Amino acid sequence: MSSEQSDTQGGIISMITNPSTCTANWFIGLSIWGIFLAFLNISGYAHPTYHYSWGGLFTLEFTNVAYELKSGSAQFVPSDAVFIAICSMFLYFGSKAYAETEDGVAGFLKGLFVNETWPALAAIGEGGIQRTLAAWAILLGFTFYAYFGISHMGWMDPGVYAVSIAFIAFGFALNHASRAPEGEDNLD
């Protein structure tokens, strides 16, 4: 094995085990969401008629069937344990990255609710209309996802993801655009 391959593999492993704060945000958010979906799936509330097999979903049914008919009680299959373990591992790495910062994990949790975005729901302040539209788009995306999941047990419905992600991504894009520095008026 050449030293370039060793450096690249060490770099990828290092990026996963010691993520930046931006990557740690994604690790924490996606891991919590994954663990939440796994417990909904085990308890039978992820879909009205099916129980998902994570191994089947992620291998495109190469290893096993992705959708099984739901039984009357909670179902726990080995792929649920593997999926929860993987999500827990990424949650650990993301939390570890925040534990090494000055504010720690508590600062991360506080930052979810106390930031510059959410006050823009009620007033157009610094950041202008872009930040206000961004906050409303993000809120609508998450609210739609939660409403449809609760009322129709469609937590893993592709249509719900399509609508939700459109609002959420548009909101994140507008939010970052509202923080961009002003450009020059004259581009000559």
Image (cartoon, rainbow, N blue to C red):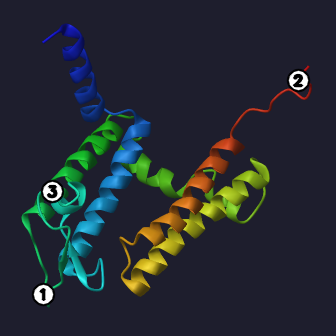
Please indicate whether residue 128 sits to the left or right of residue 27 in the image: right
Label of residue 18 in the image: none
Secondary structure at numbered mark 3: loop
Q: Is residue 118 above or below residue 100?
A: below
Extreme residue toward the left, this view: 78
- Closer-to-camera residue (151/55): 55
Please indicate whether residue 184 sits to the left or right of residue 162 in the image: right
Are the two marked residues, 2 and 3, in contact with CB atoms closer than 8 angstroms? no
**Residue annotated with mark 1:** 73
**Residue visible at 42% across and 53% down in the picture:** 109
Are the two marked residues, 1 and 2, in contact with CB atoms closer than 8 angstroms? no
Which comes sooner in the sequence, label 1 or label 2? 1
Secondary structure at numbered mark 2: loop
**Residue visible at 90% across and 29% down in the picture:** 185
Q: Can you give x and y, in whole percent of width and height, for residue 152 in the image?
A: 40, 85
Please indicate whether residue 19 sits to the left or right of residue 163 in the image: left
Residue 61 visible? The answer is yes
- Quarter holding residue 21: top left
- Label 1 to label 3: alpha-carbon separation: 26 Å
**Residue annotated with mark 3:** 62
What amino acid type is highlighted by mark number 1?
A: Ser
What amino acid type is highlighted by mark number 3?
A: Phe
**Residue annotated with mark 2:** 187
Q: Is residue 38 above or below residue 110?
A: below
Are the two marked residues, 1 and 3, in contact with CB atoms closer than 8 angstroms? no
Quarter in which the N terminus is drawn = top left
Extreme residue toward the front, this view: 62
Secondary structure at numbered mark 1: loop
Residue 102 visible? The answer is no
